[in-house]
Amino acid sequence: MSKLEDIVSLCKRRGFIFPGSDVYGGMAGTWDFGPLGVTLKKKIMDAWWEFFVESRDDMYGVDAAIIMNPRTWVASGHVATFADPLVECKECKSRFRADKIADGITESVTTEEFLATHTKCPVCGKENWGPIRKFNMMFSTHVGAVLPEDTAENKELAEKSIAYLRPETAQGIFTNYKNVVDTIYPNLPFGIAQQGKAFRNEISPRDFILRDRECSQMEIEYFVAPNTWEENFEKMRELQHEFLEKIIGLPANHLHEYDVPAEDRAHYSKRTTDFMFDYPNGAEELMGLAYRTDFDLSNIARESGKSMDYRDKVTGEVFIPHVIEPSIGVERLFLAVLSTAYSEDEVNGEKRIVLKLAENLAPYRFCVSPLLKNKPELVEKAKTVYDQIRKKYGNVTWDDSGNIGKRYRKQDEIGTPKCVVIDFDTLEDDTVTVRDRDTTEQTRIKIADL
Ligand code: GAP
């Protein structure tokens, strides 16, 4: 098994992540977070919010609607350009993203360029391709009552009622820029942050939670004076490293920056640096840092007829701010955290799987258990200790299943840093055994010192 398969298996076995709609055989590109996964995910998102919003004076949060006025996606350019190159095998009818199955080509590949790569179909092995077609990745839906499209009038009404599930959270920020300026009066530079779901009808979802049809993004639009974009881009780049390495604990040598060439950049970007992470199956984009210029605000001004101008409080100068955007997918960060933490070693001659999660991210910080569950005096004492630690730290779990060795293995697999065990000595001297997940060392500690 590859390390990724081991992680997928651990996630299902221990309740981190299940395939979406598992009971019906799944739904490609969707995943459900289980009890432990949702806790870890929330801790990652909270760490981001704390670092980029709550601990700063220049950042403000919003939580915008997922379904937005469709004009949003016309102004943003997503209706016209948010498309992947789709290619179909004429033999077996399988469909692929051309740039993902052929080497050395980009998203802007033409049919001739693709055919020249002589790529074989990954499913049937033949080389008989249809033309490259651009496939818009936005999910569409209808707002309001949906009538059968059996008359010309109904068809027209249906077309008018089309709305999209947002493909990026960013537009919920841009469309609220004016509201924030008019209510908070922030000084430039300032940022607006948002966390939430984004939807993309990916042609080939793959690599577990790395490429999903429904994902969660954490994005900031950082508004700056046009002539200061380069210095702010650099500051934002450093901040991303600080967050990923110091707060989340990703190893610096697994992170690589990649300056995206013009032909591969999104339509709105004049400069993009992708942060690539060494995942178990190879390096993939973890997040992007883009200079979006005044592209979005200018387009919104044009489409809505409303001014997006900012008046500088010191100089009185009036202009549309430019934007630096760090954008990260929660699932990709989640997988980076898991692949960093996942390790295997040997304890007492037996293979052990251990998630070496940082204390601030581990779903449970402590596990409390009585040595034997059929001894009421031990259980009662353990409950007292459990309540005491829970009051202090919140996320504590109770485990009295199986023998103590099995409990340790289970807690190692879910990444609980410390196991606290109550035994007969506890009843005598009020001390407990504290067992460390990473070293497996056991120390005797007074309950009062826990
Ligand atoms: N607002 C800018 C934007 O959306 P992007 O590069 O398309 O830019 C930003 O997406 C980040 O969102 C990516 O770096 C990745 O972390 C995450 N992301 C995008 N598409 C994803 C998908 N299909 N599955 C999981 N994460 C995705």
Image (tube, rainbow, N blue to C red):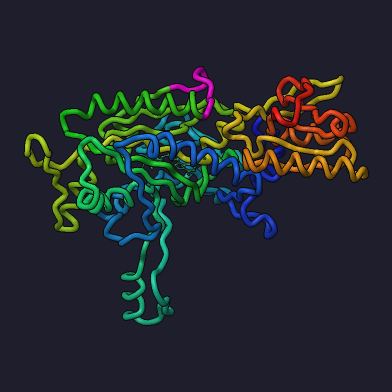
Residue 4 screen position, x and y as percent: 64, 33
Residue 373 screen position, x and y as percent: 89, 43
- Depth check: 159 or 334 in front? 334
Q: Give the quadrant of the N terminus.
A: top right
- Magenta run includes residue 210: no
Residue 112 appearing in the image: no
Q: Which residues are magenta?
A: 248-256
- Tell me which residue sits at (49%, 47%) in the image: 215
- Depth check: 349 or 115 in front? 349
Question: Quarter-wise, where is residue 378 in the image?
Answer: top right
- Depth check: 300 or 311 in front? 311
- Tell me which residue sits at (88%, 30%) in the image: 428
Quadrant in which ligand 1 is drawn: top left
Q: Give the quadrant of the C terminus.
A: top right
Going by the image, does 76 lie left or right of 383?
left
Going by the image, does 193 lie left or right of 318?
right
- Tell me which residue sits at (90%, 39%) in the image: 372
